[in-house]
Image: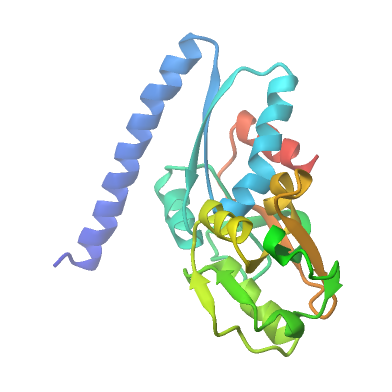
Amino acid sequence: MLTAAGIALLHRAEALEVLLRNAAEDVTLARDHVEGPLRVGGTPGALVSLVPDAINRLTRAGRTFGVHVLERSDSECQELLRRGEIEIAVVTVGIEAPPDDIQETKIASDPFSLIVGPANHELPDAMLLDAARDLRWVLPDAAGAFRRQLNALFMAANVPLPNVVVRCDSLLTTKAIVRGGDHVTILPNDVAGAEISIGVLRAIRLIDAPITRSIGVRTLAGIPLSRLARAAIEAMRK
């Protein structure tokens, strides 16, 4: 078993290995007049809400750049930041204060809705969360910020968590289950926006649970961001 000094040395060695690997890729891209690559980590819902638009905005602005996007849990993103494997973590924010070495910036807010498929066509456009509790549900399994926020939503409405639940951490699988049957879920509107726009999913306003999700970025405190990272965050704000 490693001592405290050994663990500290191991972390330094891992960070140095990442630094050397990233530097080699940076030099290769620079020779071809390509910015980056920008290394972004994030949770699934936060990534889909902010990153695609930001990439498209930067592209339309005439920038030529590379991007690595990693889908990870909140805690994994935090460790990736510390090891230098990502420069930006795109996550749910405002749930709890970040550690001293991490800084957090809110970018946007998005209301939660009850998301249903065609099989639940008889449900109204607005309803109480309590009235939906006895339906079949799909909810996240991992104990991350998103699950904590959903738990808080049920608590705020004074509604017990559902009993008939499929626990699933994949957004694609969650939406596919809801789309193909009579299960329901709760998601931020942006996360289900594409499916809602073509009519395969529907968002129902929750009268007794008017809670919004805040999403944003986490970065290492005191570490200057690259020009591309700063531009990406600005693009997310827009």
The residue at 64%/72% (across/down) is 149
Quarter placement of the C terminus: top right
Q: From this viewpoint, is residue 220 visible? A: no
Q: Which residue lies furthest to the left in this view?
A: 1
The N terminus lies in quadrant: bottom left
Q: Is residue 140 above or below residue 65?
A: below
- The picture places residue 208, in percent across and down from the top left corner, at 82, 81
Picture quarter containing residue 194?
Answer: top right
Residue lying at the far top in this picture: please name it: 32
Query: In front: 138, or 238?
Result: 138
Instruction: Report the label total.
Output: 0
Going by the image, does 161 lie left or right of 173? Answer: right
Query: At which x and y percent is residue 162?
Result: 60, 83
Residue displayed at 68% across by 47% down: 49
Q: Residue 144: in sight, yes or no?
A: yes
Judging depth in this view, the residue of 219 and 155 nearest the camera is: 155
* Position of residue 137 measured from the top left corner of the image (x, y, whole percent): 59, 73
Left or right: 140 with respect to 2? right
Give whichever of 78, 123 is nearer the camera. 123
Task: Say how the picture is coloured.
Answer: rainbow
Instruction: Residue 134: give x, y in percent of width and height.
Output: 65, 84
Q: Which of 7 and 192 is in front in this view?
A: 192
Q: In this view, does 188 lie above or below 28?
A: below
Q: Residue at x 29, y 38 (%)?
A: 17
Instruction: Identify whether 147 is placed above or below 104.
Output: below
Residue 147, by quadrant, is bottom right
